Image (tube, grey):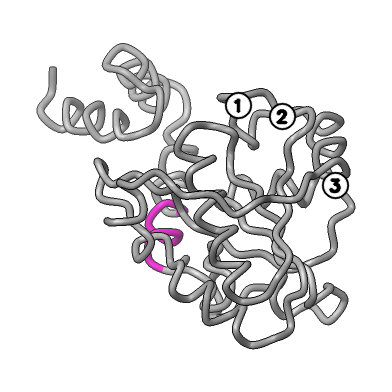
Amino acid sequence: MSPLLDELVQALRCLPGVGAKTAQRMAFHLLERDRIGARRLAEKLVAAAERIGQCSRCRTFSEEPICSLCRSPGRDDQLLCVVETPADLYAVEQATGYRGRYFVLHGRLSPLDGRGPRELGLDRLADRLAEGQVRELIVATNPTVEGEATAHYLAQIAHAAGITPSRIAHGVPVGGELEYIDRTTLAHAFLSGRRLKVQRVIQLAVTH
């Protein structure tokens, strides 16, 4: 195999779920049938990597310092929904009638992977809650073990700020990922949230 072709195949393997064979098929397809598409893909990847950063307010992906959702005057400042990823934010936006604000963690508490409160921006979240506008914190982390640990940690932060935390729960299967949940199920889960009680978080998460 050409060294450059081999480098292309290896580069494509950085995508989630793409192994050696799939990456090879992608590379061959682009070179055999769609070189124009390959150039367009390369241009957009470079542009996105260089120009897309994080919103300084909610931490979702944005080309501007403050994203369009945070700039929108039509959102409810008293509601703040915390999600794990920008993909989860988009899932909530598309599937529900939620009109509040967001905060994106870009992960969940996982000390073994080096993700503690600081990596999730929880200090920034606490500062935002201290501003006094938020009245309810909606915790929309995924219903995994780490997601639940993160949810309880967020509940502690909310209670410390005198804010009511709630948790989406009903209709979302344990171990599921929000971006793969169908719209009807996610909408029902959002309307059927339960209040969160402050509980001791897994010791590893707290002491990281």
Q: CA distance from mark 1 to mark 3?
A: 18 Å
Could you say where residue 25 lies in the image, as x and y percent from the top left? 37, 15
Do we see residue 90 in this rendering? yes
Characterize the local packing of mark 3: few (<14), some (14-19) or many (20 or more) Cα atoms within 10 angstroms.
some
Do we see residue 84 in this rendering? no
Closest to the camera, between mark 2 and mark 3, is 2
Residue at 78%, 32% (x, y): give it.
170
The residue type indicated by label 2 comes to Val
Residue, disc 2:
172
Characterize the local packing of mark 2: few (<14), some (14-19) or many (20 or more) Cα atoms within 10 angstroms.
many
Residue, disc 1:
176
The residue type indicated by label 1 comes to Gly
132 falls in the magenta region: no
Q: Tags 1 and 2 in contact by the CB under 8 Å rule?
A: yes
Which is more N-terminal, label 3 or label 2?
Answer: 3
Above or below for 20 versus 112: above
Q: CA distance from mark 2 to mark 3?
A: 14 Å
The residue type indicated by label 3 comes to Thr
Residue, disc 3:
96
Q: Secondary structure at mark 1?
A: loop
Q: Which residues are magenta?
A: 44-50
Closest to the camera, between mark 1 and mark 3, is 1
User: Dividing the image into 4 quarters, which one contains the C terminus?
Assistant: bottom left
